[in-house]
Image (cartoon, grey):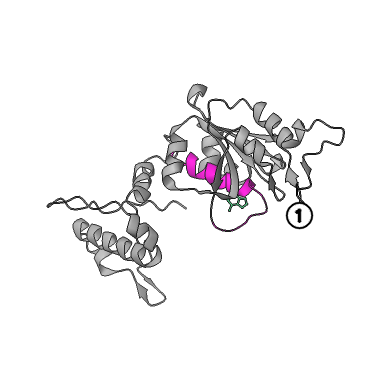
Amino acid sequence: MTSDTSKTWRATVLTLFPEMFPGPLGISLAGRALASGVWALEARDIRASAADRHRSVDDTPAGGGPGMVLRADVLAAAIDAADAQDRPKLVMSPRGRPLTQARVAELAAGPGALIVCGRFEGIDQRVIDARALEEVSIGDYVLSGGEIAAMTLIDACVRLLPGVMGKLSSATDESFSDGLLEYPQYTRPQLFEDRQIPDILLSGDHAKVARWRLAEAEALTQSRRPDLWAARPKPPESGKKRKPPKIATDG
Ligand code: ADE
C-alpha cells in the first residue's frame, strides 16, 4: 500500500458515462497500481452539473448543422467542482495536438490530470477557452467519445509512475526518447513452423546481439515511420557509439 497520498497521481475524468471507468484501467498493471494507491481515479458525471429540471447537458449548434454540442455552462460547472486547480486540464478531441511519449512523460511527472471526455458533435468553444483546456488527440481517427482516448492517455501515464513497471520502467522510458521502434523479439520454441530464431540471438555474444537489435530497430523505423526517423536524436559524435535501444515489451 502506498500510504502517502500526497504522492498519489490523480486522474479526474469528466464524462457522461462514468460507469465506463475504471474499465480496463482496473486490470493488470494499471489495476494493481490503482489498488495499491500509486494512482487514484475519480470518474465524475458531467450531468450532475446540469442545472435545469431535465438535466440537459447539450443543445443544438449555433449556426445550425447536425448533432448536439456540450454546453459551456454545464461543463464549466463540472470542471470547477472537480478540485483540479493544481493539475493540467485536458480535453480529449480528434482535433487536439497528437499525444506523444514526451507529453505522457511530462504528465506522469506531475500531480495528475483532469480529463474531459467529449461526446456529441463537440464542446462549446467558450469553455475550452475560458478554462484553458489543452486539446489532446490519440490519433487521426474518430472515436465515438473521449472515454477510450482518456483511458489510453491514463494508461500511458500510469505505467511510467515510480514502482509500476519495476525493472522494466527505465528501459521503457528510453524507447521513445531514443526515437526508434522496437526491434523484433523471439522466445521458445526455437523452431516454429519452419521459422528459426535468428542465430545471432542464440550466440551468447551480447555485443553482437545489441548491434543486431539496433540495426533492426533502425531499419524498421526508417521503413515504417520516416517521420520518427527524420526527427530522431542524432547519435553522439566522435567515437562514442550510440547505445542499443532497450525497449521493453510488456504488452
Ligand atoms: N475523441 C474522438 N476521437 C478522438 C481521438 N482520436 N483522440 C482523442 N479524443 C477523441
Residue 48, position in %: x, y?
76, 32
Residue farthest along the left direction in this orientation: 239
In the rendered image of this protein, does residue 249 appear above or below residue 222? above
Image side of residue 52 versus residue 5, left or right: right
Residue located 22% across and 63% down the image: 203
Q: Quadrant of residue 73?
A: top right
In this view, the residue in front, 36 or 78, is 78
In the rendered image of this protein, does residue 64 appear above or below residue 189? above
**Residue to which mark 1 is pinned:** 65
Residue located 63% across and 47% down the image: 146
Residue 7, position in %: x, y?
47, 25
Number of dots carrying numbers? 1
Image side of residue 88 versus residue 209, left or right: right
Residue 9, position in %: x, y?
51, 31
In the rendered image of this protein, does residue 8 appear above or below residue 239? above
Going by the numbered disc 1, the residue's amino acid type is Gly
Residue located 53% across and 29% down the image: 87
Residue located 73% across and 46% down the image: 69
What is the magenta range? 140-161
Q: Secondary structure at mark 1?
A: loop
